[in-house]
C-alpha cells in the first residue's frame, strides 16, 4: 500500500511523461500550473530524468528507459556545428523536447549548450547516460542492448572524449564553469568534485560494458589506469578532516620539484577562518574543487554523495562523511534534505564568483539552497555507508513537506525553511527523487543499479 505522498508523486510523474511518435521517451522538468519559471522547464533534462528512470526500472517499466537511452543516443549521433566548431562525437545534450509542426509531424530538438542560459556545457549528460545504461542492464539483464554496435560506439566515443588530454596535469577531468547540476556561474570551473565522482562511475561502467573488441582494447586499458589514478588522487588531495586541516595549516609553500608535499601550492592563509570553529572533532568531506593554488573549501553535497555511492570514497571516508552530516545536520540538511552547497557565497565573493547573479543570492538556489532532488543520492549513499538511520530521518523529514508544498524545485534560507523564491512547483525531479528514496529504503539490494568496483 503506497502512502499518500508516494501516490501523489507517482501521479505527477505519470502526468509528466513526454511522448515522441506515440512512445514515452522522458519526462518534462516541471508541470507548474502557473507556467514554469523558465521556458526550458518544458524540456526533458537528462540529469533530471535519472531518478524517474530508476523508478521506472524498479517498477518493471524498463521500455521507457530504453526509449530514453535510444532517443538521446540518436540526438547525439546527429552532431552539430556551433559557433565555428563541431560538437564532438560523444557529447550529449542537456535537454531535448518534442516539437510538432502545423500538420502534427513531430520532431526532436536538443540543446547542447547553444541555447542554455549562460551557454553552459552539459558535460554531465553523457556521464549520466552511461550510468543509466549500466542501471538498465543491471536491472533488466538485457545485455544484448549494450552489445549493439551503436551503443558500443557511443560508449567508446564518450570514453575517448573523457580520456583525451588537452592541457591536463592532473588525473581529474578539466571542465568549464556550470557544466553539471550547478549549471550557472558559481566558481565551479576546473576540477569540481561532482564531475570527478561521475567520471569515476563512468570509468567503472566502461570497464564493465565495453566489449574488448580491437577498437576498444586500448580505451579500456586507459580507462582502468585512469580510474586508479583518479581514485588515489581524490582520496588523498580532496579529503578534508581535522587532521588534514592541521597539515594544510602548516603547509610549506613554493616547493618546486617532484618531492613536494604541498604539490598544488595551497596557501595556508586561503583556509577560511570559519572552518576551524565549524569542523567537528570527527567527520570529514571532499572539498568542492582543487587546482593550482586553489582549494575550494565549500561542501558540495552531490559530489560527496556520489563519491560514496560509486566507491570513490574509502569505506572510512564514507563513514566520516555521514558523521559530519550527523554532527552538522542543521546546516547540511536543515528542514529539507539536502543543502546543495555550504556555506553560501556572500558579499564580494558572491559578486565576483557568480557575476552578481540574482538567482544565486546567498542561501538561495545553487548558492546554499536545499534541493529535494538530492534526497535520493543522500539516501543511497547513507545506505551504502551503513547509516540507514540518517536515510530514514531524511526521507521522513521530506515527505509530508514536499506533498504539502507540491514538490518544489528548491528551498531557500540557511536552514531551508523557505520555499525557493523562484522555484517551480510540481518539479518532476523532486517527486521522482522522493519515490526512488522510498524504493531504496524498501529494498537495499536496489543499490546494485549503481556501478561499484568490488576491489577498491
Ligand atoms: C536548473 C538546474 C539544473 C536542472 C534544470 C532543470 O537549471 O540548475 O540542474 O537540470 O534546472 O530542472
Image (tube, grey):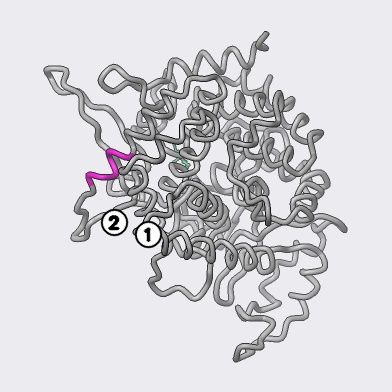
Q: Is residue 82 left or right of residue 58?
A: left
Q: What residue is pinned by disc 2?
A: 88
Q: Quadrant of the C terminus?
A: bottom right
Q: Position of residue 339 (x, y in %)?
A: 65, 42
Residue 246 appears in the figure: yes
Q: Residue at x 58, y 58 (%)?
A: 347
Q: Position of residue 105 (x, y in %)?
A: 16, 21
Q: Is residue 369 above or below residue 29?
A: below
Give neighbour class at mark 2: few <14, some 14-19, many 20+ (Cα, 10 Å): some
Q: Position of residue 30 (x, y in %)?
A: 44, 26
**Residue 74 on the magenta segment:** yes
Q: Secondary structure at mark 1?
A: helix
Q: Give me the disc on residue 161.
A: 1
Q: Is residue 326 left or right of residue 4?
A: right
Give neighbour class at mark 1: few <14, some 14-19, many 20+ (Cα, 10 Å): some
Q: Are marks 1 and 2 in contact (CB under 8 Å)?
A: yes
Q: List the single residue furthest toward the right.
A: 281
Q: Secondary structure at mark 2?
A: loop
**Residue 46 on the magenta segment:** no
Q: Which residues are magenta?
A: 73-78
Amino acid at each position: 500500500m503506497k502512502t499518500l505522498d508516494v501516490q501523489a508523486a507517482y501521479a505527477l510523474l505519470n502526468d509528466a511523461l513526454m511522448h515522441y511518435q506515440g512512445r514515452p521517451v522522458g519526462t518534462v522538468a516541471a508541470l507548474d500550473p502557473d507556467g514554469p519559471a523558465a521556458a526550458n522547464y518544458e524540456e526533458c533534462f537528462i540529469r533530471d530524468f535519472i531518478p524517474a528512470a530508476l523508478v521506472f526500472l524498479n517498477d518493471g517499466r524498463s521500455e521507457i528507459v530504453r526509449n530514453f537511452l535510444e532517443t538521446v543516443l540518436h540526438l547525439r549521433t546527429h552532431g552539430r556545428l556551433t559557433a565555428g566548431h563541431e560538437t564532438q562525437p560523444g557529447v550529449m545534450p542537456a535537454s531535448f523536447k518534442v516539437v510538432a509542426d502545423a500538420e502534427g509531424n513531430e520532431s526532436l530538438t536538443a540543446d547542447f549548450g547553444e541555447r542554455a542560459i549562460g551557454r553552459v556545457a552539459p558535460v554531465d549528460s553523457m556521464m549520466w547516460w552511461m550510468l543509466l545504461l549500466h542501471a538498465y542492464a543491471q536491472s533488466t539483464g538485457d545485455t544484448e542492448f549494450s552489445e549493439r554496435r551503436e551503443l558500443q560506439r557511443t560508449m567508446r566515443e564518450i570514453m575517448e572524449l573523457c580520456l583525451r588530454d588537452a592541457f591536463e596535469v592532473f588525473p581529474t577531468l578539466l571542465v568549464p564553469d556550470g557544466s553539471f547540476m550547478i549549471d550557472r556561474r558559481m566558481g565551479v570551473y576546473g576540477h569540481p568534485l561532482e564531475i570527478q565522482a561521475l567520471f569515476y562511475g563512468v570509468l567503472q561502467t566502461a570497464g564493465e560494458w565495453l566489449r574488448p573488441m580491437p577498437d576498444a582494447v586500448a580505451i579500456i586499458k586507459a580507462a582502468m589506469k585512469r580510474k586508479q589514478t583518479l581514485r588515489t588522487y581524490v582520496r588523498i588531495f580532496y579529503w578534508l578532516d581535522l587532521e588534514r586541516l592541521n597539515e594544510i595549516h602548516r603547509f610549506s609553500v613554493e616547493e618546486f620539484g617532484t618531492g613536494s608535499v604541498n604539490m598544488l601550492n595551497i596557501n595556508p592563509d586561503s583556509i577560511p577562518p570559519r572552518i576551524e570553529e565549524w569542523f567537528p572533532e570527527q567527520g570529514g568531506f571532499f572539498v568542492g574543487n582543487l587546482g593550482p593554488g586553489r582549494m575550494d573549501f565549500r561542501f558540495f553535497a552531490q559530489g560527496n554523495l556520489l563519491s560514496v555511492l560509486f566507491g570513490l570514497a574509502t569505506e572510512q571516508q564514507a563513514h566520516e562523511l555521514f558523521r559530519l552530516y550527523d554532527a552538522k545536520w542543521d546546516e547540511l540538511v536543515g528542514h529539507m534534505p539536502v543543502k546543495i552547497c555550504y556555506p553560501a557565497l556572500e558579499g564580494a565573493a558572491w559578486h565576483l564568483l557568480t557575476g552578481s547573479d540574482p538567482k544565486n543570492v546567498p542561501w538561495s538556489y545553487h548558492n546554499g539552497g536545499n534541493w529535494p532532488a538530492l534526497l535520493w543520492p543522500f539516501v543511497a549513499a547513507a545506505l551504502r555507508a551503513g547509516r540507514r538511520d540518517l536515510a530514514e530521518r531524511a526521507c521522513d523529514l521530506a515527505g509530508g513537506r514536499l506533498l504539502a508544498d507540491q514538490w518544489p524545485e528548491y528551498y531557500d534560507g540557511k536552514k531551508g525553511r523557505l520555499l525557493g523564491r523562484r522555484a517551480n512547483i510540481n518539479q518532476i525531479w523532486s517527486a521522482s527523487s522522493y519515490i526512488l528514496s522510498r524504493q531504496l529504503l524498501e529494498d537495499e539490494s536496489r543499490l546494485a543499479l549503481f556501478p561499484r568496483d568490488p576491489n577498491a
